[in-house]
Image (cartoon, coloured by chain):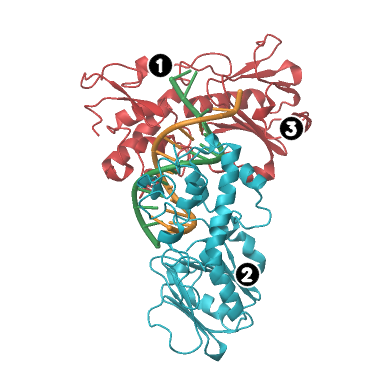
Chain colours: A red, B cyan, C green, D orange
Amino acid sequence: MELPETIVLSQQMDKELVGKQVSHIEVSNPKCLNMPFEEFQKTVAGKQISSVKARGKWFFISLDTHMLLFNPGMGTDILYFTDSNYPEKYQIKIECENGTVVTFRVWWFCYLHLVKAEELEKHRMTATLGMTPFDEPFTLDCFAHLLHKKRGSIKSFLLDQKKVAGIGNFYIHDILFNAGIHPMRKISSLTDTEIEALYHSMRSLLSKSVKLGGSRYEKDFYGNYGGFDAKEHFKVGYNSECPVCHTKIQKIKTGSTSSYVCPQCQPL
Amino acid sequence: MELPETIVLSQQMDKELVGKQVSHIEVSNPKCLNMPFEEFQKTVAGKQISSVKARGKWFFISLDTHMLLFNPGMGTDILYFTDSNYPEKYQIKIECENGTVVTFRVWWFCYLHLVKAEELEKHRMTATLGMTPFDEPFTLDCFAHLLHKKRGSIKSFLLDQKKVAGIGNFYIHDILFNAGIHPMRKISSLTDTEIEALYHSMRSLLSKSVKLGGSRYEKDFYGNYGGFDAKEHFKVGYNSECPVCHTKIQKIKTGSTSSYVCPQCQPL
DNA sequence: TAATCTAACAACGA
DNA sequence: CTCGTTGTTAGATT
């Protein structure tokens, strides 16, 4: 789940959940919490949800005096039910008044952290998040400054949530392709023109996916898959031939992640 | 300069300097300070030295309300003079009452930091120092616990001042040889017997050097070289043949440092 | 399809 | 052969 999906989901969650009171909460794996379950349960129960927002890959759920922070990790869906027809399999379940149920189904890890509203800035994992590409102050100039004098590769920079929040190893392939930049390019070698192309590429691809309701591999709050399809909307990501120059797309190892690259359009 | 030398020097400095008042201080490279020179000079001048101690490779010089912290870096000597016959070349000079002069001659880089006594624990570089092998709580059991579940090589662990303070790339060779341990051995592969041998090896070699007044390559406070000679007192360090098995000693690259190893007595 | 933290390590600069 | 910072990588995590 990357920025388009968290944006879509958080808007739907905000629409459906704001004003509702949490009546009951279940957490099958308490290791994802930042406190003992007892304490967590006691603090959350009875609180009212006042807003749901996303920042990068984190959900920020306001509970009056507290903030509930959720990082979905990999392969997670968050589903909304208004009756008892919710699935049996889930790791986290939040029940609200009037039969509203939200289930969180996590493939591997997630974090569900609760902090006092006034201590939100002390929460390391979210306090160190960078801006998202849609944040108002994230201008081209701001992006260029973030890249200034940085030493590593552009791909690891973009995936680092402390630098820019919300990009993962799904949208990254075409963000780079559309800017004509190889994932292993050193940041210091990028021209102003390339940085500008990257800035626009990032924002336009992610907003296209938001408009389509997010990735077709992920469910929204109502269980519907998004309309952004890799084969259809990506040029190189998860594809086999470059639609621009018809070169065979390479799938290469880039550090710990894989990358789809057109060696012609994205020279190193 | 490693633990034996800082111990010897700090004892001599303590003996000669305690009770003396700093009258004047010169610092040729203000980049080694943690504040502007003006402020540094103003705070230090007139203060009385109440003790000099060493912790690992750092000197702790108590100045009543403040602590002066000195890390000698590489190739540094600290010399004591009671008249004006001090050398012309120095990077730092501390003058005290009655003609006492201390010069610090630094080959490359050093740190000279001044902190308020009550804010000593906020000084990152010294606050994160590990125990020295001679610290009271540094028992065999304590050492074994420090090694518990560590992943890297034993050499990089021992050189890490945050783990154990005071060992550098001079004494390390024979500390490992005397325990029969190759520098590149994974910590997780060490047996209890080897950990015990290493613990004793470390303490006995370092205390032998302290008794001899430190390394013959370094000067003490009075300008005299120590009595611990590499060729004479080391078995493998800076030597060419293993005195135990007569195998040719290897000089190998171990990460960023070099190591002297007997491949027979220290199998990998 | 896909994430995060930590420790260890290398390169670099002061 | 100093230390810190930055970035990379391997390992572990449920």
Q: Is residue A130 visible?
A: no
Left or right: where B182 falls relative to B56? left
Residue B3: horizontal and vertical position, in percent? 53, 61
Q: Which mark is residue B116?
A: 2
| Amino acid under disc 1 | Asp
Q: Secondary structure at mark 1?
A: loop
Q: Which mark is residue A229?
A: 1
Residue denoted by label 3: A36
Q: Mark 1 to mark 3: distance in Å?
A: 40 Å
Judged by depth in the image, the label closer to the viewer, 2 or 3, is 2
Rendered position, B14 above or below B20: above
Question: Numbered disc 1: what chain?
Answer: A
Residue A9: horizontal and vertical position, in percent? 55, 24
Judged by depth in the image, the label closer to the viewer, 2 or 1, is 2
Do the dots labelled 1 and 3 sit on one chain?
Answer: yes
**In which quadrant of the rendered view does residue A120 lie?**
top right
Nearest the viewer among A11 and A235 is A235
Q: Mark 2 to mark 1: distance in Å?
A: 61 Å
- Image quadrant holding the C terminus of chain B, namely top left
Question: Numbered disc 2: what chain?
Answer: B
Judged by depth in the image, the label closer to the viewer, 1 or 3, is 3
| Amino acid under disc 2 | Lys
How many residues crowd around disc 3 within 10 Å: few (fewer than 14), some, or many (20 or more)?
A: few
Residue A119: horizontal and vertical position, in percent? 67, 45
Tag count = 3
Mark 1 or mark 3, earlier in chain:
3
